[in-house]
Image (cartoon, helix red, strand yellow):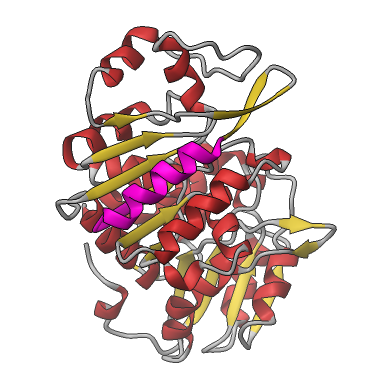
Amino acid sequence: MRSVREIKVFENIPILVRAALNVPVENGKVVNDYRLRRALPTIHFLAERGARVVLIGHLGNKGTETLKTVAEALGALTRGVSFLDETVGARARGAVRDLAPGNILVLENLRRNRGETTNDAAFAKELASLADIFVQDCFDTCHRPHASIVGVPKLLPSYAGFLLEEEIRELSRARSPKRSSLAVIGGTKFSTKEAVLTELLKTYGHVFVGGALANGFLKASGQEVGKSLVSDADEGSIKKLLSNPKLILPVDSVVVNGAIVDHGLGTVEALAELAVRAKSILWNGPLGKYEDGFTDATDGFARAVANSKACSVVGGGDTVAAVERLGLLPHFSFVSTGGGAMLQFLANGTLPGITALEN
């Protein structure tokens, strides 16, 4: 995989950059620009060398949202940003052609075109026609077999941006933790967590299952979960994981109207004790119904990790939002921009978008 540093010529060259533009937008405004700030090193590197920087990305899942708001937020962070309400076609090609060296053009939401998510060869070809070089710098979508992720690299000389390189380096280290280690995996769906839990149990000293995900494990272990949300999972798969002595479950719960909504103080204290002793901590997924305001366990564990001396890696949208809300981001060793991509990389050591750059 080639680095963006290995590009030979920049001046006046149109360079297509798949960037992490999927940021939270409320009432027409970006409410958290963390991913945009993480995208800046690669953007600046190219623009400062006179490239015509063409940013492509997505916002939301349905393709109905516009990236105009995101382009405006990016423009507040750096100079020379413009926006075009098209992704491909004659207008897009003309806008790229007219872009001054060192300036940045943000194209419209990729997912407005169905060819993006279906990895349509014709759509990938149209995207590739906009530039001479492709840079992949959107780790959080590298697990998706989409046109801008796996299709375009087949058609253009392709390179990894700084953010992607950092994600690969730090998460590769997290796959081989120091001897005293703790992994905490929360969230809801067992289907998206089974592979990573299986892998982490091979390498981590303790693996805690939290959030709604834990309810299925508690039920399989014979505990009463009442009206709690339980992931639709094969009980045999859960019991296989339960048989591993490294696996840890909550020891107490906060129950509202017959449903578990958060972990109790005893669980948070137990996790904090493990965090104090750990040399490596990995965390993905909130601990409780975070979206409904039940944040005590998530916040308590975040503070425990921030106060530890461990090498700490955190990822997942809600998890990172919680850490940032508490002002604790600087106290974590590495903050991943990926959620599902982070989990899949930890399970497999690579992603489709990374493999595409290696071919």
Nearest the eye: 287 or 161 = 287
Judge whether residue 335 is colored magenta: no
**Quadrant of the snapshot with the N terminus:** bottom left
Q: In the rendered image, which quarter is residue 164 located in? A: bottom left
**Side of 28 relative to 90 (left or right):** right
| Figure check: 10 above or below 331 | below
Nearest the eye: 262 or 123 = 262
Q: Is residue 151 visible?
A: no
Give the x, y percent position of residue 277. Answer: 27, 54
- Dominant secondary structure of the residues highlighted in magenta in the image: helix
Give the x, y percent position of residue 85. Answer: 73, 62
Q: Residue at x 60, y 64 (%)?
A: 326
Q: Residue furthest left?
A: 179
Give the x, y percent position of residue 155. Answer: 35, 56
| Figure check: 120 above or below 331 | above
Nearest the eye: 241 or 279 = 279
Q: Is residue 46 visible?
A: yes
Magenta stretch in the rendered image: 264-281
Q: Residue at x 52, y 47 (%)?
A: 123
**Side of 173 relative to 128 (left or right):** left
**Side of 241 relative to 32 (left or right):** left
Give the x, y percent position of residue 177. Answer: 20, 52
Q: Residue furthest right?
A: 27
Q: Residue at x 26, y 15 (%)?
A: 240
Judge whether residue 273 is colored magenta: yes
**Side of 95 relative to 313 (left or right):** right
Q: How many marks?
A: 0
| Figure check: 322 above or below 159 | above
